Image (cartoon, rainbow, N blue to C red):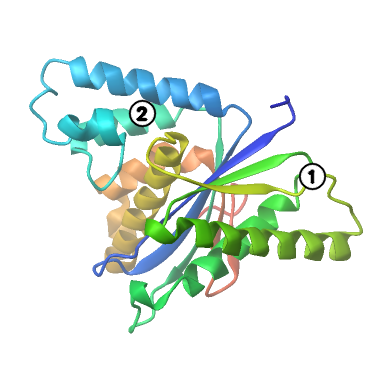
Amino acid sequence: MTTQDVFMFVDETGIDEESKILAITCIVTREPEHIRKALTKLKQELVKKKGFKDIPSIQNLQKKGFHYCEDHKDVRSKVIDLIAILPFEAYICYRCKVHNFCPSDGFEWYDQLFGKLMHNRLRKYQSPVSISFEQHGKSFKNREKELEDIIKRIVHQIEREDAVKFHHIPVIKSAGKEESCLAVSDYIAAIFKDYEEALIKVGNENSGSWQARNFSMLRPKIRLIHDYDNNKFFSRHNPFP
C-alpha cells in the first residue's frame, strides 16, 4: 500500500420485500486501517459495556461485526456517532423499485447502479484503486469476475472519452463480514434508504423523525447522491431534500 492508494467499499440495500428503493453505496478512503481499528475498538467497548451485555445483537457482535438491520437501536446510535468522524467520503446511486421486482431474477439492477457509481468515481482516480464488495452467497467468485468485467469496460470508456490512460486497472474483490469497512457502507446505505422512504411517504413532515436525525448526522460525509431514474445529482451545492 502506498500513500496514494484509494480504497472503495461497496454495499447495497433494498432487496427485501418491504423496501421501496434500491441503493448502492460506495465509501472512499485512503485510511482503511484507521476505520477498521476504530470499529474494532468500539465493538470491544460495547461488548464489555455495562447495560449492553443483555442486548441480543451484542451476542453476535464479536463474530459478525456491525450490521445495521441486526444492530439494536442503542448500538446503531454509537456506530453512527463514530462513523460521523471517520476519514471517508460516501457516494450513493439509487432508484425506485419496479412493481414486479424479485431479487432472485439476478443482478441486473445492481450492475446498472454499480456501473453508474463506479464510472463517476473512477473518473477521479488514476492512482491504484482497490474495490471491495460484500459477497453474494456462494456465487461470489462469479460475481467477482462479472464486476471485474464491468470495471474494465468503465476504464476503457473513460480512457476513450477523456483521453487519459489508467496505469493501474482497479482491483475488485469480494469480502465477507470480516471486512469491517463494509459496515460503514452498510450503515450509510440503510440510513439513506430509511430516510428516502420516509420522505416518499410523508414528505417534509419527516424532518423531525428518527430517520431524518440519523441522515442529518451522516449527511456531511455524503458527497454525491445520484437519482438513477431521473438522472439527478445531489451534492453539497445542490443538497438532497
Position of residue 139 relative to residue 95, above or below, is above
Q: Residue at x 33, y 42 (%)?
A: 214
Q: Nearer the viewer, residue 10 or 97?
A: 10
* Quadrant (top left/top right/bottom left/bottom right) for the N terminus: top right
Position of residue 116 relative to residue 90, above or below, is below
Q: Residue at x 62, y 49 (%)?
A: 237
Furthest residue toward right: 163
Q: Secondary structure at mark 1?
A: loop
- The residue type indicated by label 1 comes to His
Image location of residue 13, percent across then percent down: 38, 58
Image location of residue 111, percent across then percent down: 55, 67
Q: Which residue is mark 2?
A: 81
Q: Nearer the viewer, residue 173 or 66?
A: 173
Which corner quadrant of the image does residue 72 belong to? Answer: top left
Q: Which mark is residue 168?
A: 1
Q: Residues within 10 Å of mark 1 (few under 14, many from 20)?
A: few
Residue 241 appears in the figure = no
Kindly report the distance in space between the C-alpha atoms of the residues bearing marks 2 and 1. 35 Å
Q: Which mark is residue 12?
A: none
Q: Secondary structure at mark 2?
A: helix
**In the rendered structure, which disc, 2 or 1, sits on the residue that comes first in sequence?**
2
Position of residue 83 relative to residue 117, above or below, is above
In the image: residue 123, left or right of residue 7:
right
Image location of residue 118, percent across then percent down: 64, 56
Mark 2 or 1: the one toward you: 1
- The residue type indicated by label 2 comes to Asp
Image location of residue 173, percent across then percent down: 56, 47
Q: Nearer the viewer, residue 80 or 129?
A: 129
